[in-house]
Amino acid sequence: MSDLQERQQQLLDYIMGKPSDIHEHIQDRGKVSVDIQLHIYRNAYQVSFWETLDTDHELLGKYLGDDMFNTMVRDYIAAYPSTFRSLRDFGDRLPKFLTEHETFSPHPQIAEFARFERELLVAFDAMDADMCSREDLTRIAPEQWAQLKVEFHPSVRAFITGYNVVDIWQHLKADRSPPDAIARNEYWVLWRNRDRLTEFASLDGFEQAMYETFSKGYNLEQTAEFLIEISNSDPTEKLLTTLFSWLDRGWITRLHAGLNVVS
Amino acid sequence: MSNDFLGFGLGLRTDHFHDVLETKPKNIDWFEIISENFMVDGGKPKYYLHAIREHYPMVMHGVSMSLGSTDPLDMDYMKRLKQLHDELQPEWLSDHLCWTGINGINTHDLLPVPYTEEALDLMVERIKQAQDYMGRQILLENPSSYISFDDSAIPEWEFLGALTERADCHILFDVNNVYVSARNHGFDPLEYIKKTPADRVKQFHLAGHTDYGDYIIDTHDHDVPDPVWELYKEALLHFGPVSTMIERDGNIPPFEDLRGELQIARKIANETLSPEQLTPRYQEAV
Ligand SMILES: [Fe+2]
Protein backbone atom coordinates (compact mmCIF):
# COMPACT_ATOMS: atom_id res chain seq x y z
CA MET A 1 0.00 0.00 0.00
CA SER A 2 1.37 3.45 -0.90
CA ASP A 3 1.69 6.18 1.73
CA LEU A 4 -1.16 8.06 0.12
CA GLN A 5 -3.41 5.03 0.06
CA GLU A 6 -2.61 4.29 3.68
CA ARG A 7 -3.38 7.86 4.74
CA GLN A 8 -6.66 7.84 2.85
CA GLN A 9 -7.67 4.51 4.38
CA GLN A 10 -6.85 5.85 7.85
CA LEU A 11 -8.84 9.04 7.39
CA LEU A 12 -11.79 7.21 5.86
CA ASP A 13 -11.81 4.66 8.70
CA TYR A 14 -11.77 7.47 11.22
CA ILE A 15 -14.60 9.34 9.49
CA MET A 16 -16.69 6.16 9.38
CA GLY A 17 -16.13 5.58 13.09
CA LYS A 18 -13.76 2.63 12.74
CA PRO A 19 -10.44 2.15 14.58
CA SER A 20 -7.76 4.27 12.89
CA ASP A 21 -4.23 5.61 13.41
CA ILE A 22 -4.89 8.85 11.56
CA HIS A 23 -4.27 11.00 14.67
CA GLU A 24 -0.56 10.26 14.44
CA HIS A 25 -0.36 11.80 10.98
CA ILE A 26 -2.10 15.12 11.59
CA GLN A 27 -0.18 18.29 12.46
CA ASP A 28 -0.93 19.63 15.93
CA ARG A 29 -1.74 23.32 15.48
CA GLY A 30 -1.88 24.00 19.21
CA LYS A 31 -4.95 26.24 19.24
CA VAL A 32 -7.31 23.49 18.15
CA SER A 33 -6.69 19.88 19.16
CA VAL A 34 -6.20 17.21 16.52
CA ASP A 35 -9.33 15.55 17.90
CA ILE A 36 -11.45 18.59 17.20
CA GLN A 37 -9.93 19.09 13.75
CA LEU A 38 -10.65 15.51 12.78
CA HIS A 39 -14.06 15.51 14.36
CA ILE A 40 -15.19 18.19 11.90
CA TYR A 41 -14.93 15.57 9.14
CA ARG A 42 -16.64 12.81 11.08
CA ASN A 43 -19.45 15.16 11.99
CA ALA A 44 -19.88 16.42 8.41
CA TYR A 45 -20.15 12.80 7.24
CA GLN A 46 -23.02 12.11 9.62
CA VAL A 47 -24.75 15.43 9.01
CA SER A 48 -24.81 15.28 5.22
CA PHE A 49 -26.45 11.85 5.23
CA TRP A 50 -28.84 12.85 7.99
CA GLU A 51 -29.90 15.90 5.99
CA THR A 52 -30.36 13.84 2.85
CA LEU A 53 -32.63 11.32 4.54
CA ASP A 54 -34.46 14.07 6.39
CA THR A 55 -35.23 15.79 3.08
CA ASP A 56 -36.08 12.65 1.12
CA HIS A 57 -38.04 11.00 3.96
CA GLU A 58 -39.55 13.94 5.76
CA LEU A 59 -42.78 12.16 6.60
CA LEU A 60 -41.03 8.96 7.67
CA GLY A 61 -39.22 11.21 10.15
CA LYS A 62 -42.55 12.51 11.36
CA TYR A 63 -43.93 8.98 11.62
CA LEU A 64 -40.96 7.65 13.60
CA GLY A 65 -40.31 10.70 15.79
CA ASP A 66 -36.88 12.26 16.27
CA ASP A 67 -35.27 9.58 18.45
CA MET A 68 -36.24 6.64 16.26
CA PHE A 69 -35.37 8.57 13.10
CA ASN A 70 -31.93 9.42 14.47
CA THR A 71 -31.33 5.78 15.42
CA MET A 72 -32.39 4.75 11.95
CA VAL A 73 -30.06 7.24 10.25
CA ARG A 74 -27.07 6.37 12.44
CA ASP A 75 -27.44 2.63 11.91
CA TYR A 76 -28.24 2.98 8.23
CA ILE A 77 -25.08 5.04 7.59
CA ALA A 78 -23.05 2.31 9.31
CA ALA A 79 -24.79 -0.58 7.54
CA TYR A 80 -25.01 0.90 4.04
CA PRO A 81 -22.32 3.54 3.46
CA SER A 82 -22.76 5.48 0.25
CA THR A 83 -21.31 4.10 -2.94
CA PHE A 84 -23.37 6.53 -5.01
CA ARG A 85 -22.25 9.51 -7.05
CA SER A 86 -25.18 11.57 -5.85
CA LEU A 87 -26.66 11.91 -2.38
CA ARG A 88 -30.00 11.66 -4.13
CA ASP A 89 -29.55 7.89 -4.27
CA PHE A 90 -28.22 7.42 -0.76
CA GLY A 91 -31.55 6.21 0.65
CA ASP A 92 -32.11 3.58 -2.04
CA ARG A 93 -31.31 0.75 0.36
CA LEU A 94 -33.31 2.19 3.24
CA PRO A 95 -36.43 0.01 2.74
CA LYS A 96 -34.24 -3.10 2.67
CA PHE A 97 -32.35 -1.96 5.77
CA LEU A 98 -35.62 -1.40 7.63
CA THR A 99 -36.67 -5.01 7.00
CA GLU A 100 -33.33 -6.18 8.50
CA HIS A 101 -32.96 -3.95 11.55
CA GLU A 102 -34.05 -5.44 14.89
CA THR A 103 -35.92 -2.31 15.99
CA PHE A 104 -37.77 -1.75 12.75
CA SER A 105 -38.30 -5.18 11.24
CA PRO A 106 -41.05 -6.16 13.74
CA HIS A 107 -43.07 -3.26 12.23
CA PRO A 108 -43.03 -4.05 8.53
CA GLN A 109 -45.19 -1.07 7.64
CA ILE A 110 -42.15 1.18 8.33
CA ALA A 111 -40.15 -0.38 5.49
CA GLU A 112 -43.23 -0.14 3.27
CA PHE A 113 -43.63 3.52 4.18
CA ALA A 114 -40.01 4.18 3.20
CA ARG A 115 -40.48 2.22 -0.01
CA PHE A 116 -43.46 4.39 -0.90
CA GLU A 117 -41.38 7.55 -0.42
CA ARG A 118 -38.56 6.10 -2.56
CA GLU A 119 -41.04 5.35 -5.36
CA LEU A 120 -42.28 8.93 -5.22
CA LEU A 121 -38.70 10.13 -5.68
CA VAL A 122 -38.15 7.77 -8.60
CA ALA A 123 -41.31 9.05 -10.30
CA PHE A 124 -40.17 12.64 -9.71
CA ASP A 125 -36.82 12.10 -11.49
CA ALA A 126 -37.92 9.59 -14.13
CA MET A 127 -37.10 10.08 -17.78
CA ASP A 128 -39.06 12.71 -19.68
CA ALA A 129 -41.38 11.52 -22.43
CA ASP A 130 -44.39 12.73 -24.36
CA MET A 131 -47.85 12.32 -22.91
CA CYS A 132 -50.72 11.27 -25.17
CA SER A 133 -54.12 12.90 -24.91
CA ARG A 134 -57.72 11.80 -25.58
CA GLU A 135 -57.44 13.40 -29.00
CA ASP A 136 -54.55 11.09 -29.88
CA LEU A 137 -56.77 8.10 -29.17
CA THR A 138 -59.69 9.43 -31.17
CA ARG A 139 -57.34 9.89 -34.12
CA ILE A 140 -56.92 6.12 -34.37
CA ALA A 141 -59.44 4.51 -36.75
CA PRO A 142 -62.09 2.52 -34.82
CA GLU A 143 -61.32 -0.68 -36.73
CA GLN A 144 -57.78 -0.55 -35.33
CA TRP A 145 -58.79 -0.19 -31.71
CA ALA A 146 -58.88 -3.92 -31.08
CA GLN A 147 -55.14 -4.03 -31.80
CA LEU A 148 -54.35 -1.03 -29.62
CA LYS A 149 -51.40 -1.34 -27.25
CA VAL A 150 -50.27 1.29 -24.80
CA GLU A 151 -46.83 2.29 -23.62
CA PHE A 152 -46.77 3.90 -20.19
CA HIS A 153 -44.85 7.06 -19.35
CA PRO A 154 -41.49 6.23 -17.67
CA SER A 155 -42.65 7.80 -14.39
CA VAL A 156 -45.70 5.50 -14.08
CA ARG A 157 -45.19 2.70 -11.58
CA ALA A 158 -47.29 0.40 -9.44
CA PHE A 159 -46.88 0.42 -5.67
CA ILE A 160 -48.27 -2.83 -4.29
CA THR A 161 -48.22 -3.11 -0.53
CA GLY A 162 -49.60 -5.21 2.30
CA TYR A 163 -50.16 -2.22 4.61
CA ASN A 164 -52.19 0.98 4.79
CA VAL A 165 -49.02 3.05 4.48
CA VAL A 166 -50.36 5.46 1.89
CA ASP A 167 -53.22 6.37 4.22
CA ILE A 168 -50.72 6.88 7.06
CA TRP A 169 -48.54 8.99 4.75
CA GLN A 170 -51.48 11.17 3.70
CA HIS A 171 -52.50 11.80 7.31
CA LEU A 172 -48.97 12.88 8.21
CA LYS A 173 -48.77 15.05 5.12
CA ALA A 174 -51.96 16.83 6.19
CA ASP A 175 -50.63 17.19 9.75
CA ARG A 176 -53.23 14.84 11.15
CA SER A 177 -52.48 12.02 13.56
CA PRO A 178 -51.97 8.84 11.53
CA PRO A 179 -54.22 5.76 11.79
CA ASP A 180 -52.88 2.52 13.26
CA ALA A 181 -51.01 0.31 10.87
CA ILE A 182 -53.27 -2.34 9.35
CA ALA A 183 -52.20 -5.28 7.22
CA ARG A 184 -54.24 -5.03 4.02
CA ASN A 185 -53.43 -5.42 0.36
CA GLU A 186 -53.44 -2.21 -1.61
CA TYR A 187 -52.61 -1.37 -5.19
CA TRP A 188 -51.50 2.15 -6.10
CA VAL A 189 -50.08 3.75 -9.20
CA LEU A 190 -47.63 6.64 -8.89
CA TRP A 191 -46.84 9.03 -11.72
CA ARG A 192 -45.54 12.48 -12.56
CA ASN A 193 -48.31 14.69 -13.89
CA ARG A 194 -48.38 17.27 -16.64
CA ASP A 195 -47.11 19.92 -14.18
CA ARG A 196 -44.18 17.61 -13.32
CA LEU A 197 -45.53 16.94 -9.83
CA THR A 198 -45.86 13.43 -8.44
CA GLU A 199 -49.33 12.01 -7.87
CA PHE A 200 -50.73 8.65 -6.86
CA ALA A 201 -54.08 6.92 -7.08
CA SER A 202 -55.56 3.74 -5.68
CA LEU A 203 -56.70 1.18 -8.28
CA ASP A 204 -59.73 -1.09 -7.90
CA GLY A 205 -59.60 -4.72 -9.05
CA PHE A 206 -60.82 -3.90 -12.55
CA GLU A 207 -58.31 -1.08 -13.14
CA GLN A 208 -55.48 -3.16 -11.65
CA ALA A 209 -56.20 -6.01 -14.03
CA MET A 210 -56.41 -3.59 -16.92
CA TYR A 211 -53.15 -1.87 -15.93
CA GLU A 212 -51.29 -5.14 -15.53
CA THR A 213 -52.57 -6.58 -18.80
CA PHE A 214 -51.58 -3.48 -20.79
CA SER A 215 -48.25 -3.33 -18.94
CA LYS A 216 -47.48 -6.84 -20.11
CA GLY A 217 -47.99 -5.75 -23.72
CA TYR A 218 -51.42 -7.22 -24.46
CA ASN A 219 -53.68 -5.29 -26.82
CA LEU A 220 -57.09 -3.84 -26.10
CA GLU A 221 -59.01 -6.86 -27.44
CA GLN A 222 -57.00 -9.28 -25.30
CA THR A 223 -57.37 -7.00 -22.29
CA ALA A 224 -61.14 -6.82 -22.81
CA GLU A 225 -61.38 -10.61 -22.99
CA PHE A 226 -59.52 -10.92 -19.73
CA LEU A 227 -61.71 -8.30 -18.11
CA ILE A 228 -64.90 -10.12 -19.19
CA GLU A 229 -63.65 -13.16 -17.32
CA ILE A 230 -63.06 -11.31 -14.08
CA SER A 231 -66.04 -8.94 -14.17
CA ASN A 232 -68.67 -11.28 -15.69
CA SER A 233 -70.14 -8.41 -17.69
CA ASP A 234 -69.40 -6.29 -20.74
CA PRO A 235 -66.30 -4.30 -19.73
CA THR A 236 -66.20 -2.04 -22.82
CA GLU A 237 -67.62 1.10 -21.32
CA LYS A 238 -65.58 0.97 -18.14
CA LEU A 239 -62.49 0.06 -20.10
CA LEU A 240 -62.81 3.10 -22.33
CA THR A 241 -63.62 5.46 -19.46
CA THR A 242 -60.56 4.19 -17.64
CA LEU A 243 -58.36 4.54 -20.70
CA PHE A 244 -59.52 8.14 -21.13
CA SER A 245 -58.73 8.89 -17.49
CA TRP A 246 -55.21 7.50 -17.97
CA LEU A 247 -54.73 9.72 -20.99
CA ASP A 248 -55.95 12.76 -19.04
CA ARG A 249 -53.49 12.01 -16.27
CA GLY A 250 -50.57 11.70 -18.67
CA TRP A 251 -49.92 8.01 -17.99
CA ILE A 252 -49.50 7.05 -21.62
CA THR A 253 -46.55 8.03 -23.76
CA ARG A 254 -47.40 6.00 -26.89
CA LEU A 255 -50.42 4.36 -28.48
CA HIS A 256 -49.60 1.57 -30.90
CA ALA A 257 -52.32 0.40 -33.27
CA GLY A 258 -51.07 -1.95 -35.96
CA LEU A 259 -48.46 0.03 -37.85
CA ASN A 260 -49.66 3.36 -36.48
CA VAL A 261 -47.84 4.84 -33.56
CA VAL A 262 -49.27 7.93 -31.92
CA SER A 263 -47.26 9.85 -29.41
CA MET B 1 -6.73 35.66 -26.64
CA SER B 2 -10.33 34.74 -25.93
CA ASN B 3 -12.22 36.65 -23.28
CA ASP B 4 -13.14 34.22 -20.51
CA PHE B 5 -14.75 36.86 -18.33
CA LEU B 6 -18.41 35.96 -17.98
CA GLY B 7 -19.19 38.71 -15.48
CA PHE B 8 -21.04 38.11 -12.21
CA GLY B 9 -23.04 34.96 -11.52
CA LEU B 10 -24.80 32.90 -8.91
CA GLY B 11 -25.02 29.25 -8.00
CA LEU B 12 -28.36 28.01 -9.35
CA ARG B 13 -30.42 26.57 -6.50
CA THR B 14 -33.78 24.76 -6.53
CA ASP B 15 -35.35 27.41 -4.30
CA HIS B 16 -34.79 30.03 -7.00
CA PHE B 17 -35.73 28.13 -10.19
CA HIS B 18 -39.10 29.77 -10.45
CA ASP B 19 -37.87 33.30 -9.66
CA VAL B 20 -35.06 33.08 -12.22
CA LEU B 21 -37.39 32.04 -14.98
CA GLU B 22 -40.12 34.53 -14.04
CA THR B 23 -37.83 37.55 -13.73
CA LYS B 24 -34.82 36.67 -15.94
CA PRO B 25 -32.80 39.38 -14.21
CA LYS B 26 -30.26 41.24 -16.29
CA ASN B 27 -27.92 41.92 -13.38
CA ILE B 28 -26.96 38.24 -13.25
CA ASP B 29 -24.65 37.36 -16.11
CA TRP B 30 -24.39 33.59 -15.68
CA PHE B 31 -25.15 30.61 -13.43
CA GLU B 32 -23.15 27.76 -12.01
CA ILE B 33 -24.84 24.42 -11.41
CA ILE B 34 -23.81 21.49 -9.21
CA SER B 35 -23.47 18.77 -11.86
CA GLU B 36 -24.55 15.88 -9.60
CA ASN B 37 -27.90 17.54 -8.88
CA PHE B 38 -28.87 17.13 -12.51
CA MET B 39 -27.59 13.62 -13.15
CA VAL B 40 -31.16 12.38 -13.24
CA ASP B 41 -33.15 11.12 -16.20
CA GLY B 42 -35.79 13.83 -16.24
CA GLY B 43 -38.44 15.67 -14.28
CA LYS B 44 -38.89 19.14 -12.91
CA PRO B 45 -35.29 20.14 -12.01
CA LYS B 46 -34.07 19.20 -15.47
CA TYR B 47 -36.95 21.05 -17.08
CA TYR B 48 -35.96 24.21 -15.21
CA LEU B 49 -32.28 23.67 -15.95
CA HIS B 50 -32.80 23.64 -19.69
CA ALA B 51 -35.32 26.48 -19.60
CA ILE B 52 -32.87 28.67 -17.67
CA ARG B 53 -29.94 27.60 -19.86
CA GLU B 54 -31.75 29.15 -22.84
CA HIS B 55 -31.34 32.55 -21.23
CA TYR B 56 -27.98 32.37 -19.43
CA PRO B 57 -24.44 31.09 -19.93
CA MET B 58 -23.72 28.27 -17.49
CA VAL B 59 -20.77 26.49 -15.97
CA MET B 60 -20.79 23.04 -14.38
CA HIS B 61 -19.29 22.45 -10.95
CA GLY B 62 -18.83 18.87 -9.79
CA VAL B 63 -18.14 17.33 -6.40
CA SER B 64 -17.54 13.66 -7.20
CA MET B 65 -14.59 13.37 -9.59
CA SER B 66 -12.41 12.60 -6.57
CA LEU B 67 -9.23 13.52 -8.42
CA GLY B 68 -7.04 13.00 -5.36
CA SER B 69 -8.29 9.47 -4.65
CA THR B 70 -6.15 6.36 -5.01
CA ASP B 71 -9.19 4.54 -6.47
CA PRO B 72 -9.34 4.41 -10.27
CA LEU B 73 -11.30 7.25 -11.87
CA ASP B 74 -15.02 6.36 -11.77
CA MET B 75 -15.78 6.04 -15.47
CA ASP B 76 -19.53 5.62 -14.88
CA TYR B 77 -19.46 9.00 -13.24
CA MET B 78 -17.37 10.49 -16.04
CA LYS B 79 -19.78 9.14 -18.63
CA ARG B 80 -22.76 10.65 -16.86
CA LEU B 81 -20.89 13.92 -16.50
CA LYS B 82 -20.07 13.99 -20.19
CA GLN B 83 -23.70 13.33 -21.07
CA LEU B 84 -24.79 16.30 -19.00
CA HIS B 85 -21.95 18.37 -20.41
CA ASP B 86 -22.98 17.59 -23.99
CA GLU B 87 -26.62 18.36 -23.22
CA LEU B 88 -25.86 21.64 -21.54
CA GLN B 89 -22.84 22.93 -23.47
CA PRO B 90 -21.43 24.84 -20.50
CA GLU B 91 -18.70 27.46 -20.73
CA TRP B 92 -16.50 25.13 -18.68
CA LEU B 93 -16.56 22.55 -15.92
CA SER B 94 -14.77 22.27 -12.62
CA ASP B 95 -14.09 20.00 -9.68
CA HIS B 96 -11.89 20.13 -6.58
CA LEU B 97 -8.39 19.53 -5.37
CA CYS B 98 -9.63 16.78 -3.07
CA TRP B 99 -10.73 13.19 -2.78
CA THR B 100 -14.17 12.00 -1.71
CA GLY B 101 -13.59 8.35 -0.87
CA ILE B 102 -11.75 5.12 -1.62
CA ASN B 103 -12.69 1.46 -2.12
CA GLY B 104 -15.91 2.57 -3.77
CA ILE B 105 -17.14 4.46 -0.69
CA ASN B 106 -18.30 8.03 -1.24
CA THR B 107 -18.22 10.30 1.81
CA HIS B 108 -19.75 13.10 -0.29
CA ASP B 109 -17.26 15.39 1.43
CA LEU B 110 -14.28 17.17 -0.09
CA LEU B 111 -11.40 15.60 1.80
CA PRO B 112 -7.89 17.11 1.84
CA VAL B 113 -4.93 15.54 0.08
CA PRO B 114 -1.48 15.38 1.72
CA TYR B 115 0.65 17.79 -0.30
CA THR B 116 3.37 15.34 -1.30
CA GLU B 117 5.18 14.48 -4.54
CA GLU B 118 3.30 11.19 -4.62
CA ALA B 119 -0.10 12.91 -4.48
CA LEU B 120 1.04 15.46 -7.05
CA ASP B 121 2.09 12.78 -9.54
CA LEU B 122 -1.14 10.88 -9.02
CA MET B 123 -3.35 13.93 -9.42
CA VAL B 124 -1.52 15.14 -12.54
CA GLU B 125 -2.18 11.80 -14.23
CA ARG B 126 -5.83 11.72 -13.16
CA ILE B 127 -6.53 15.28 -14.29
CA LYS B 128 -4.96 14.50 -17.67
CA GLN B 129 -7.11 11.38 -17.90
CA ALA B 130 -10.25 13.34 -17.00
CA GLN B 131 -9.44 16.08 -19.50
CA ASP B 132 -8.76 13.55 -22.25
CA TYR B 133 -12.09 11.91 -21.60
CA MET B 134 -14.02 15.17 -21.45
CA GLY B 135 -12.20 16.51 -24.48
CA ARG B 136 -11.42 19.81 -22.78
CA GLN B 137 -9.52 21.42 -19.95
CA ILE B 138 -11.09 21.49 -16.52
CA LEU B 139 -10.91 23.94 -13.62
CA LEU B 140 -9.65 22.76 -10.26
CA GLU B 141 -10.86 24.46 -7.09
CA ASN B 142 -8.68 25.03 -4.04
CA PRO B 143 -10.33 23.34 -1.04
CA SER B 144 -11.11 24.57 2.44
CA SER B 145 -9.68 22.23 5.05
CA TYR B 146 -9.53 21.59 8.77
CA ILE B 147 -6.52 19.30 9.07
CA SER B 148 -2.96 19.30 7.70
CA PHE B 149 -1.13 16.05 7.23
CA ASP B 150 2.33 15.59 8.73
CA ASP B 151 3.37 14.30 5.32
CA SER B 152 2.56 17.61 3.60
CA ALA B 153 5.91 18.92 2.40
CA ILE B 154 4.66 21.58 -0.04
CA PRO B 155 2.44 24.62 0.68
CA GLU B 156 -1.02 24.27 -0.84
CA TRP B 157 -0.49 27.14 -3.32
CA GLU B 158 2.68 25.54 -4.63
CA PHE B 159 0.93 22.21 -4.95
CA LEU B 160 -1.99 23.83 -6.80
CA GLY B 161 0.33 25.82 -9.06
CA ALA B 162 2.48 22.79 -9.93
CA LEU B 163 -0.61 20.69 -10.51
CA THR B 164 -2.20 23.12 -12.93
CA GLU B 165 1.06 23.64 -14.83
CA ARG B 166 1.84 19.97 -15.18
CA ALA B 167 -1.71 18.81 -15.95
CA ASP B 168 -2.37 21.94 -18.03
CA CYS B 169 -5.66 22.73 -16.36
CA HIS B 170 -7.19 25.91 -14.95
CA ILE B 171 -7.98 27.13 -11.45
CA LEU B 172 -11.29 27.93 -9.83
CA PHE B 173 -10.03 30.21 -7.10
CA ASP B 174 -12.31 30.11 -4.08
CA VAL B 175 -11.56 33.29 -2.13
CA ASN B 176 -13.53 32.14 0.89
CA ASN B 177 -11.70 28.79 0.98
CA VAL B 178 -8.37 30.59 1.04
CA TYR B 179 -9.61 32.70 3.93
CA VAL B 180 -11.00 29.67 5.83
CA SER B 181 -7.87 27.56 5.35
CA ALA B 182 -5.54 30.49 6.10
CA ARG B 183 -7.25 30.98 9.45
CA ASN B 184 -7.40 27.25 10.19
CA HIS B 185 -3.79 26.55 9.27
CA GLY B 186 -2.22 29.88 10.08
CA PHE B 187 -0.86 30.91 6.68
CA ASP B 188 -1.01 34.30 4.95
CA PRO B 189 -3.88 34.47 2.45
CA LEU B 190 -2.09 37.22 0.50
CA GLU B 191 0.87 34.95 -0.03
CA TYR B 192 -1.52 32.32 -1.39
CA ILE B 193 -2.92 34.85 -3.86
CA LYS B 194 0.47 36.17 -4.91
CA LYS B 195 1.95 32.72 -5.47
CA THR B 196 -0.96 31.43 -7.53
CA PRO B 197 -0.31 31.64 -11.31
CA ALA B 198 -2.67 34.37 -12.57
CA ASP B 199 -2.89 33.03 -16.10
CA ARG B 200 -4.48 29.82 -14.80
CA VAL B 201 -7.33 31.40 -12.83
CA LYS B 202 -10.61 31.36 -14.73
CA GLN B 203 -13.28 31.62 -12.04
CA PHE B 204 -13.81 32.91 -8.51
CA HIS B 205 -16.04 31.54 -5.78
CA LEU B 206 -17.25 33.77 -2.99
CA ALA B 207 -19.14 32.43 0.02
CA GLY B 208 -19.80 32.79 3.71
CA HIS B 209 -18.67 30.54 6.53
CA THR B 210 -19.17 29.92 10.25
CA ASP B 211 -16.50 31.40 12.48
CA TYR B 212 -15.95 29.52 15.77
CA GLY B 213 -13.07 31.75 16.79
CA ASP B 214 -10.33 29.14 16.95
CA TYR B 215 -11.41 27.61 13.69
CA ILE B 216 -13.76 28.28 10.77
CA ILE B 217 -16.08 25.90 8.99
CA ASP B 218 -16.90 26.42 5.34
CA THR B 219 -20.68 26.25 5.64
CA HIS B 220 -21.91 28.44 2.75
CA ASP B 221 -24.87 29.42 4.90
CA HIS B 222 -24.07 33.08 5.61
CA ASP B 223 -23.56 36.23 3.57
CA VAL B 224 -20.04 36.86 2.31
CA PRO B 225 -18.27 38.53 5.28
CA ASP B 226 -16.06 41.61 5.11
CA PRO B 227 -12.68 39.85 5.33
CA VAL B 228 -13.63 37.76 2.31
CA TRP B 229 -14.68 40.89 0.38
CA GLU B 230 -11.31 42.43 1.24
CA LEU B 231 -9.53 39.36 0.00
CA TYR B 232 -11.66 39.44 -3.15
CA LYS B 233 -10.32 42.91 -3.89
CA GLU B 234 -6.77 41.62 -3.50
CA ALA B 235 -7.58 38.71 -5.78
CA LEU B 236 -8.91 41.08 -8.46
CA LEU B 237 -5.74 43.17 -8.23
CA HIS B 238 -3.58 40.11 -8.72
CA PHE B 239 -5.65 38.05 -11.16
CA GLY B 240 -7.48 40.81 -13.08
CA PRO B 241 -11.04 40.30 -14.35
CA VAL B 242 -12.16 36.80 -13.40
CA SER B 243 -15.72 35.44 -13.65
CA THR B 244 -17.12 35.82 -10.16
CA MET B 245 -19.97 34.09 -8.38
CA ILE B 246 -21.50 33.56 -4.95
CA GLU B 247 -22.11 30.06 -3.61
CA ARG B 248 -24.95 29.68 -1.16
CA ASP B 249 -25.94 26.20 0.02
CA GLY B 250 -27.62 26.59 3.37
CA ASN B 251 -30.01 29.02 4.99
CA ILE B 252 -30.81 30.16 1.46
CA PRO B 253 -32.21 33.71 1.34
CA PRO B 254 -34.78 35.02 -1.16
CA PHE B 255 -33.44 35.36 -4.69
CA GLU B 256 -33.65 39.17 -4.43
CA ASP B 257 -31.24 39.18 -1.49
CA LEU B 258 -28.63 37.09 -3.31
CA ARG B 259 -28.90 39.35 -6.32
CA GLY B 260 -28.26 42.27 -4.01
CA GLU B 261 -25.21 40.55 -2.54
CA LEU B 262 -23.85 39.92 -6.02
CA GLN B 263 -23.98 43.65 -6.72
CA ILE B 264 -21.47 44.14 -3.90
CA ALA B 265 -19.03 42.00 -5.88
CA ARG B 266 -19.75 44.05 -9.00
CA LYS B 267 -19.19 47.27 -7.10
CA ILE B 268 -15.85 46.10 -5.70
CA ALA B 269 -14.73 45.01 -9.16
CA ASN B 270 -15.79 48.37 -10.63
CA GLU B 271 -13.72 50.17 -8.02
CA THR B 272 -10.73 47.91 -8.59
CA LEU B 273 -10.55 47.38 -12.35
CA SER B 274 -11.24 49.44 -15.45
CA PRO B 275 -14.53 49.27 -17.41
CA GLU B 276 -12.66 47.82 -20.44
CA GLN B 277 -11.34 44.98 -18.28
CA LEU B 278 -14.84 44.27 -17.00
CA THR B 279 -16.60 43.78 -20.32
CA PRO B 280 -18.10 40.31 -20.18
CA ARG B 281 -17.75 37.92 -23.09
CA TYR B 282 -21.42 37.93 -24.01
CA GLN B 283 -21.80 41.66 -23.75
CA GLU B 284 -19.07 42.11 -26.36
CA ALA B 285 -20.98 40.02 -28.83
CA VAL B 286 -24.08 42.24 -28.62
FE1 LIG C 1 -16.20 26.82 -3.71
Image (tube, coloured by chain):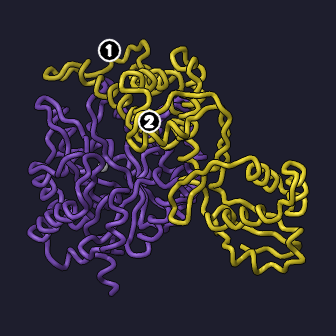
Chain colours: A yellow, B purple
Label 2 sits on residue: A53
Q: Residue furthest front?
A: A233
Residue B67 located left or right of residue B281: right
Circle 1 is placed at which residue position? Answer: A24
Q: Choose between B173 and A259: the one closer to the eye.
A: A259
Quadrant hosting residue B283: bottom left
Name the amino acid, label 2. Answer: Leu
Residue A231 placed where, x, y %? 84, 51
Q: Chain of mark 1?
A: A
Quote the CA–CA distance across marks 1 and 2.
34 Å
Q: Residue at x 19, y 47 (%)?
A: B222
x and y, in percent, of residue A109 in the image: 57, 28
Residue B24, placed above or below residue B166:
below
At a point 41% along the width and 44% down the height, the residue shown is A174
Chain containing mark 2: A
The answer to which of marks 1 and 2 sits earlier in the sequence is 1
Front-most of residues A187 and B123? A187
Give the side of residue A146 with respect to residue A85, left or right. Answer: right
Res. A3 visible in picture = no
Callout 1, which amino acid? Glu
